[in-house]
C-alpha cells in the first residue's frame, strides 16, 4: 500500500468513473441501451456536478461505462482553476477524442468554449459549469435516449463516483470574494446557496443509503446562506435557518461523520467549534489561509489579519483541544519578498497546523494577479515551496509521533491482500494521511468504524493495531 502524497490539495483531485453496479456497468447493459462515459477532473465540487449529470442520465435509461471503448460518447468535466489544470483538461479531452472520438465538454473550462474548440475543434459540444440541462441536451443530440419503461427506472439513490461509505455534500455554488489570483467567481458566478431543507434532505438520503461520512463542500462554506439572508425553511417539525452553524448542527444529528471543507475564517466560525467539542461534527476545519504576511495578503485581496488569526486558532483549540486544522498556502506570489516568506515560516511555527498543502503561484488566464509587478522567478518559487513543505513536514511528523500509543476510532476506506487503509477523524479522503492496519485486518470492510491503537508514525501516516477484533 502506498503512503498518501504530502502535496495533494482538494482542487487537484482527479476522479474517473469506477466500475460500479449502481452506475449501470456495461456488464448489466441491455441490448441497444445507449451508454455514456465520464471523465471528471478538478475539485470535489466538480465531482458532485458529474454525479448529478450521471444520475440524470441514468434516470433517462443511459448506462454508464467505466472505459472509453464501452461508451457511445464521453463527457469530460474540466477544471480551469490554474493554467496547469487547464493543460490537464485539454490533455484529457485529447485522450477522450483519441480513444473514443465523440466527446462533450463541460465544467469550469467550458466557460471558454473558443479556447477549447481552438485546441480541439472535433468536440461535439461545450457547456459551462453546473449547466446540467445543456449537458443533457448535448448528450441527447449525440446519443439519443432509448429508455425501456419496464426496465429503466429512476435509481433508488444517486449515481456516485466516491466509495459507498462517504459522499461530498455541496451546499452552495459560486463565491462573493474577489481574490486577485482566483477566477472562480468569473467561471461559477456569485454565491448561490441551496435552501437548508434541500441540503438536509439530500444528506438524510445519503445516510439512509449507507454513507458514513458527509464531506461538506462549496467555494466558501462559512458564507452559506448569506445570499439568502439566512432564510428559514421547513424541516421535519421545525424551521431551519440557512446558516452554516444551524446546518452543521442539523447534519450532526443524522448519525454520520460530518467534515467541513473550504471554511473561510469569519468570526462566526468560532460558533462551529463547540459543535465539534460536543461530538456533533468532526473536530476538523479546512481553512484556506493562503499566506501570513499582511502585505502579501493585501496584494491577494484577502483579509490581512494574520495576528488575529493566531488568536482565533488559540481560541478554537481552547474550546476543542482535539481540533485538526488543515490549510493551503501560495508561495512565490507576485511581490513576495524573502522577508514576507520568512514571516510565513515563522507563522507556521506558531500556528502548528496539522495538515498543510502548498503550491507555487502561477498565472491564470483572466486573473488580476497576472498584472501585478515583481513576479517571482520559478526557481525561487520552487525553493520556497520546498522550504515550506520541509517545515510543514516537521510539524506533521511531531504531531503524529505524539499520537503513538493512543487509542482512536478510524473508518476503513479500502481492504486488500496487504492490509486495511483507514482514516482517522483528522484525515479527509484523498488529501490527508492514512492509518494502515497490516495485521488482523481480515473481515474488515470499507465504511466500517473500528478502534485501533496507534503503534507507529511517519511524516504523514500512521500504523496501528485493531482492538476488540
Image (tube, rainbow, N blue to C red):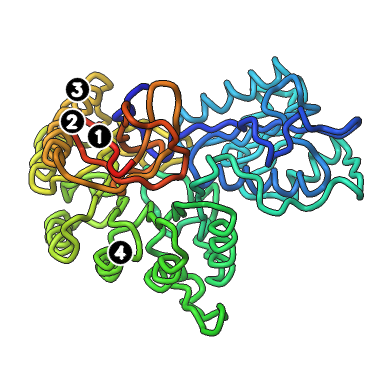
Task: Give the number of the mark in front: 4 or 3.
Answer: 4
Q: Residue 456 carries which label?
A: 2
Compared to residue 378, the image places residue 175 above or below, namely below
Compared to residue 76, the image places residue 427 above or below, namely below
> Which residue is the site of mark 1?
464
In terms of image quadrants, where is residue 396? top left
Q: In the visual, does 144 lie left or right of 158? A: right
Q: Which of 201 and 424 is in front in this view?
A: 424
> Which residue is the site of mark 4?
279
Q: Tell me if residue 128 can be seen.
A: yes
* Dot 3 crowding, Cα within 10 Å, few <14, some 14–19, many 20+: few
Q: What element carries label 4?
A: loop
The residues tagged by marks 4 and 3 sit, at their Cα atoms, a distance apart of: 41 Å
* Dot 2 crowding, Cα within 10 Å, few <14, some 14–19, many 20+: some
> Which residue is the site of mark 3?
383
Residue under the image location 37 percent in, 63 percent down: 222
Q: In the visual, does 301 lie left or right of 92? A: left
Residue under the image location 48 percent in, 30 percent down: 85
Amino acid at each position: 500500500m502506498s503512503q498518501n502524497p504530502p502535496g495533494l490539495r482538494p482542487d487537484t483531485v482527479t476522479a474517473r468513473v469506477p466500475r460500479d453496479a449502481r452506475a449501470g456497468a456495461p456488464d448489466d447493459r441491455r441490448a441497444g441501451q445507449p451508454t455514456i462515459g465520464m471523465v471528471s477532473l478538478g475539485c470535489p465540487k466538480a465531482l458532485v456536478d458529474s454525479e448529478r449529470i450521471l444520475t440524470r442520465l441514468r434516470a433517462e435509461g443511459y448506462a454508464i461505462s467505466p472505459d472509453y471503448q464501452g461508451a457511445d460518447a464521453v463527457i469530460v468535466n474540466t477544471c480551469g482553476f490554474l493554467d496547469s489544470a487547464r493543460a490537464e483538461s485539454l490533455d484529457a479531452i485529447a485522450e477522450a477524442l483519441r480513444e473514443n472520438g465523440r466527446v462533450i465538454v463541460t465544467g469550469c473550462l467550458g466557460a471558454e468554449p473558443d479556447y477549447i474548440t481552438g485546441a480541439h475543434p472535433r468536440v461535439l459540444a461545450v457547456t459551462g459549469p453546473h449547466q446540467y440541462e445543456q449537458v443533457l441536451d448535448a448528450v441527447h443530440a449525440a446519443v439519443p435516449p432509448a429508455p425501456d419503461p419496464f426496465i429503466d427506472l429512476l435509481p433508488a439513490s444517486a449515481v456516485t463516483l466516491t466509495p459507498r461509505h462517504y459522499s461530498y455534500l455541496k451546499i452552495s455554488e459560486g463565491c462573493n470574494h474577489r481574490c486577485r489570483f482566483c477566477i472562480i467567481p468569473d467561471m461559477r458566478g456569485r454565491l448561490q446557496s441551496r435552501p437548508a431543507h434541500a441540503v438536509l434532505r439530500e444528506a438524510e438520503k445519503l445516510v439512509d443509503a449507507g454513507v458514513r461520512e458527509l464531506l461538506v463542500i462549496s467555494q466558501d462554506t462559512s458564507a452559506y446562506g448569506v445570499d439568502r439572508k439566512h432564510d428559514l425553511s421547513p424541516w421535519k417539525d421545525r424551521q431551519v435557518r440557512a446558516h452554516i452553524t444551524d446546518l452543521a448542527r442539523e447534519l450532526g444529528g443524522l448519525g454520520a461523520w460530518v467534515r467541513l471543507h473550504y471554511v473561510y475564517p469569519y468570526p462566526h466560525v468560532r460558533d462551529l467549534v463547540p459543535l465539534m467539542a460536543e461530538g456533533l461534527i468532526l473536530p476538523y476545519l479546512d481553512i484556506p489561509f493562503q499566506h501570513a504576511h499582511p502585505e502579501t495578503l493585501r496584494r491577494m485581496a484577502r483579509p490581512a489579519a494574520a495576528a488575529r488569526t493566531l488568536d482565533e486558532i488559540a481560541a478554537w483549540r481552547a474550546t476543542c483541544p482535539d481540533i485538526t486544522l488543515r490549510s493551503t498556502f501560495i508561495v512565490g506570489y507576485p511581490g513576495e519578498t524573502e522577508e514576507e516568506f520568512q514571516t510565513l515560516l515563522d507563522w507556521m511555527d506558531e500556528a502548528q497546523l496539522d495538515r498543510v498543502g502548498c503550491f507555487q503561484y502561477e498565472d491564470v488566464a483572466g486573473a488580476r494577479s497576472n498584472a501585478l509587478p515583481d513576479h517571482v522567478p520559478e526557481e525561487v518559487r520552487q525553493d520556497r515551496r520546498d522550504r515550506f513543505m520541509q517545515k510543514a513536514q516537521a510539524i506533521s511528523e511531531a504531531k503524529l509521533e505524539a499520537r503513538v500509543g493512543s487509542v482512536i476510532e478510524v473508518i476503513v476506506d479500502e481492504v486488500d491482500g496487504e492490509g486495511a487503509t483507514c482514516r482517522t477523524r483528522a484525515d479527509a479522503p484523498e488529501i490527508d494521511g492514512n492509518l494502515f492496519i497490516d495485521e488482523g485486518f481480515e473481515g474488515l470492510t470499507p465504511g466500517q468504524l473500528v478502534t485501533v491503537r496507534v503503534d507507529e508514525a511517519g511524516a504523514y501516516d500512521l500504523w496501528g493495531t485493531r482492538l476488540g477484533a
